[in-house]
Amino acid sequence: MARAVQVTTDSRRRTVGVLRLANHVTIRLPAVMGVLNVTPDSFSDGGRYLDPDRAVERALLMAREGAQIIDIGGESTRPGARELPVEVECERVLPVIRKLAGRLNRPISIDTRKAIVAEQALEAGAAIVNDVSAMTFDSAMASVVARYRASVVLMHMRGTPATMQHLARYRDVVGEVCRYLARRARAAQAAGIVRSRIILDPGIGFAKQTSHNLKLLAGLSRLGRLGYPILVGVSRKNFIRQIAGAEQEQLMFGTAAAVSLAIGAGAAIIRVHDPGPMAAAVRVAAAIYAAQI
Ligand code: HH2
């Protein structure tokens, strides 16, 4: 059973402890999730890991650098991206998961909106389904997750990657995201997924303008009050590019700043492209916040 322990100190609330996945696998929180996009067109690492052997090497390297989870995706969800046929997505991710299953001593997460892809990935050894549509895209997703006793990341977005940036209008972005994710978590439990297997994600960059991303990160502790572990994906995203600049170092340090503050606001898992440097940032941020208790 997954369990994230909420500790409240004065006005601050943080997630500490461990996350329990299927098959008695545990992850110490806060944890780093390394991104592995097996796609030609992802906004940051597109085209670099389409070859399964290169993808496997990259996953193993990320694990050595400090990633506790490897998140594998075959379909880009960058703004404007079009939906991919399910067969193509399977052809991209499954060989990598199968090759990794015997070699990687870290849980694998499958980044997909499609139940068939999720099911085959879980069958091949994945333990977490990372669904950016919060299981709204495919009505069969919840039953697959429940049947395999997988953990699931429910992320907030609106529309699809192709339409989402036209839907970035909110009165109270933090409140609306919290209410939406609370609803999706209830729906997941109604479909048979146990509460302790649910992880929530505000969906930074998905149907959000820069101001929305900043408000969500500043108000992250409100999301934590729902009582689920929070995953945050800020790595190299456009709002960091806009604020810090597009050079590699600017993106890296900008990401580290956002990661550190997210940890301080209670994030349990951070999803990043550079697990080595970000694991260091997480360790320091987590140590400082632990000293407040
Ligand atoms: N961001 C991306 C993809 N999947 N999943 C979660 N839970 N949270 C995120 O913030 C998130 C995500 C986008 O980043 P990336 O995978 O690098 O790009 P692309 O979608 O173009 O492959």
Image (spheres, rainbow, N blue to C red):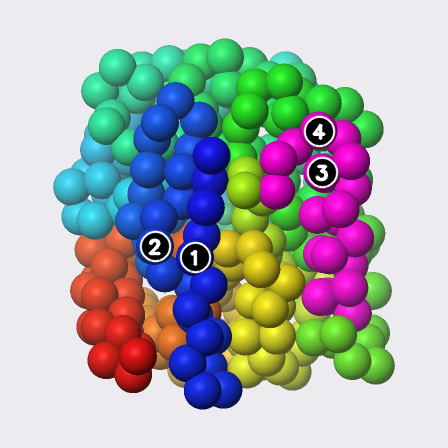
- Residue extent of the magenta highlight: 176-195
Question: Residue 293 at what x, y percent from top left?
Answer: 30, 79
Mark carried by residue 189: 3
Kindly report the distance in space between the C-alpha atoms of the residues bearing marks 1 and 3.
19 Å
Around disc 3, counting alpha carbons within 10 Å, would you say few (fewer than 14), some (14 to 19), or many (20 or more)? some
Kindly report the distance in space between the C-alpha atoms of the residues bearing marks 2 and 4.
24 Å
Q: Are marks 1 and 2 in contact (CB under 8 Å)?
A: yes
Q: Is label 1's Cβ within 8 Å of ligand 1?
A: no
From the image, tell me which residue sits under label 4. Answer: 192
Mark carried by residue 125: none
| Point 52% across, 58% down: residue | 230
Q: Visible in this render: residue 271?
A: yes
Residue 41 appears left or right of 25 = right
Q: Is residue 143 above or below residue 197?
A: above
As for residue 193 lying within the magenta part, the answer is: yes
From the image, tell me which residue sits under label 2. Answer: 17
Q: Quick one: SS at disc 1? A: strand
Q: Amino acid at mark 2?
A: Gly
Q: Is label 2's Cβ within 8 Å of ligand 1?
A: no
> In the rendered structure, which disc, 1 or 4, sits on the residue that comes first in sequence?
1
Kindly report the distance in space between the C-alpha atoms of the residues bearing marks 2 and 3.
22 Å
From the image, tell me which residue sits under label 1. Answer: 5
Kindly report the distance in space between the C-alpha atoms of the residues bearing marks 1 and 4.
22 Å
Around disc 2, counting alpha carbons within 10 Å, would you say few (fewer than 14), some (14 to 19), or many (20 or more)? some
Q: Quick one: SS at disc 3? A: helix
| Point 55% across, 14% down: residue | 120
Question: Residue 208 at what x, y percent from top left?
Answer: 69, 69
Q: Quick one: SS at disc 4? A: loop
